[in-house]
């Protein structure tokens, strides 16, 4: 026997959905600031809801952390590592290939720098944090490999390329006052000069 849904129940469902989204958004912020020291009370305060609302949607951190991770990976929009070579098809010169590499890496950072910082800082906080960190690192390495494949770089040069497109490098350039376009151009020019 199926239950009828009363018309008055629909707004509650919409409210519950909004509360869940607020909790997830707040939790992502709290986790990026406090890492493993984050508490459900902190999440509730940041979301502007009662702690009971947080627990109603996520009975434990073991349920909240993976939900946050899923949202973070969705926002990061990581390209499939197996499909990385396709991103460089038709690009023959070092300048073109490096520009695409930097564009892809910096795009990821623009969408998910805070999340990547957390996964790097505390990969052992939860298995899904370690998985997210692995996804970020695998993707970046695949992008580097695909970008420099035609140039037969020795391992040390490949490692240099990877370091120059790293999150820490991007953050250092941004902290030095370079806007996203200027940071990307600087890295692209330096790497192209090195490889060409």
Image: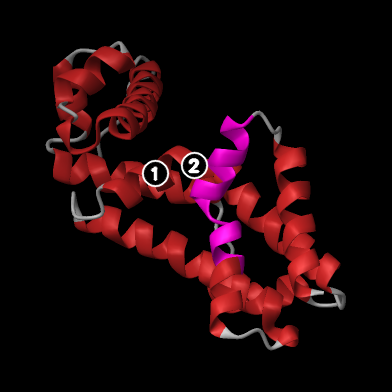
Q: Position of residue 115 (x, y in %)?
A: 41, 42
Please, is residue 64 above or below residue 188 in the view?
above
Q: Are marks 2 and 1 in contact (CB under 8 Å)?
A: yes
Q: Which image quadrant for residue 192? A: bottom right
Using the rendered image of the protein, determine whether residue 191 is visible from the camera's viewpoint. yes
Residue at the image point whose x is 61% and y is 76% from the top: 157
Q: Position of residue 196 (x, y in %)?
A: 82, 74
Residue at the image point whose x is 70% and y is 38% from the top: 180
Magenta stretch secondary structure, dominant: helix
Using the rendered image of the protein, determine whether residue 1 is visible from the camera's viewpoint. no
Please, is residue 99 above or below residue 119 in the view?
below
Q: Is residue 120 within the magenta segment?
A: no
Element under label 1? helix
Please, is residue 193 above or below residue 42 in the view?
below
Element under label 2? helix
Q: Which mark is residue 113?
A: 2
Q: Which mark is residue 117?
A: 1
Q: Which residues are magenta?
A: 161-176
Residue at the image point whose x is 55% and y is 40% from the top: 172
Q: Position of residue 99 (x, y in %)?
A: 78, 60
Q: Position of residue 171 (x, y in %)?
A: 54, 40
């Amino acid at each position: 026997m199926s239950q009828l849904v009363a018309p008055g129940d629909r707004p509650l469902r919409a409210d519950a959905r909004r509360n869940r989204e607020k909790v997830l958004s707040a939790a992502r912020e709290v986790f990026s600031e406090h890492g493993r020291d984050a508490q459900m009370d902190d999440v509730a305060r940041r979301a502007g809801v009662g702690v009971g609302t947080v627990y109603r949607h996520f009975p434990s951190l073991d349920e909240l952390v993976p939900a946050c991770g899923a949202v973070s990976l969705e926002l990061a929009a990581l390209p499939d590592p197996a499909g990385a070579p396709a991103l460089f098809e038709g690009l023959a010169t070092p300048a073109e290939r490096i520009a695409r590499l930097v564009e892809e890496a910096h795009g990821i950072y623009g969408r998910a720098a805070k999340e990547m910082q957390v996964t790097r800082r505390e990969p052992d906080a939860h298995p899904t944090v370690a998985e997210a960190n692995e996804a970020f690192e695998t993707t970046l390495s695949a992008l580097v490999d695909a970008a420099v494949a035609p140039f037969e770089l020795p391992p040390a040069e490949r490692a240099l390329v990877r370091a120059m497109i790293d999150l820490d490098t991007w953050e250092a350039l941004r902290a030095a006052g370079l806007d996203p376009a200027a940071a990307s151009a600087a890295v692209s020019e330096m790497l192209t000069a090195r490889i060409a």
